[in-house]
Image (cartoon, rainbow, N blue to C red):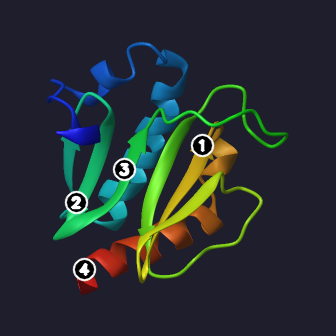
Amino acid sequence: MGDMGQPVNHEEQFFRNKPGLWPLYEELLEQIRRLYPLTIVQVKNTQISFIDKHLYACVSFLRFKRAPNLPKDYFVLTLGMPSPVTSQRLMMVVEPYPGRFTTHIPIGSMGDLDLELFGWLDEAHQFALDK
């Protein structure tokens, strides 16, 4: 099954080992539900997926080697993008196949949920709808 894992009962259960990040996720989820009301949220053991026609984003606890700009505690928002994004905020961008860039963004504070992030999220959402 790869990284999809087995279903988890609820999003809050997903954050049981990182309860300090739960309010941050709740804020992200609130904005996603407001911006994209048709989004389906699927909770698995290793990630929470956001789907509107196709998968456009997911939240996980993917770990990165320590880097100067990495928050002490964070979750990762992964977006499927049509083109590479360049920013100091990104931890990794991978092109799994031509024309799709999997973009990993650490989220460690409310300040990370800014206009730039939601611009990227909107681009990923639109990319999923256009498939």
CA separation in Å, label 4 and label 3:
16 Å
Secondary structure of residue under mark 3: strand
* Nearest to the observer: residue 1 or residue 124: 1
Question: In the image, residue 100 lies at what x, y percent?
Answer: 41, 75
Return the residue at label 4. Answer: 129
Q: Are marks 3 and 1 in contact (CB under 8 Å)?
A: no
Q: Do the residues labelled 1 and 4 touch (CB within 8 Å)?
A: no
Label 2 vs 4, first from the N-terminus = 2
Residue type (three-letter) at the residue carrying disc 1? Ile
**Crowd class of label 2 (few under 14; some 14 to 19; many from 20; radius 10 Å):** some
Return the residue at label 3. Answer: 58
Residue type (three-letter) at the residue carrying disc 4? Leu
Question: In the image, residue 72 lies at what x, y percent?
Answer: 72, 26
Label 4 vs 3, first from the N-terminus = 3
- The residue depicted at 35 percent of the width and 72 percent of the height is 125
Label 3 vs 1, first from the N-terminus = 3
Q: Quadrant of residue 26?
A: top left
* Nearest to the observer: residue 94 or residue 118: 94
CA separation in Å, label 2 and label 3:
9 Å
Q: Is residue 131 above or below residue 62?
A: below
Residue 117 is left or right of residue 67, and the answer is left
Farthest right residue in view: 68
Secondary structure of residue under mark 1: strand
Residue type (three-letter) at the residue carrying disc 3? Cys
- The residue depicted at 69 percent of the width and 47 percent of the height is 111
Question: In the image, residue 18 lies at what x, y percent?
Answer: 49, 18
Return the residue at label 2. Answer: 51
Looking at the rendering, in which quadrant would you find the N terminus? Answer: top left
**Crowd class of label 1 (few under 14; some 14 to 19; many from 20; radius 10 Å):** many
Q: Quadrant of residue 9?
A: top left
Secondary structure of residue under mark 4: helix
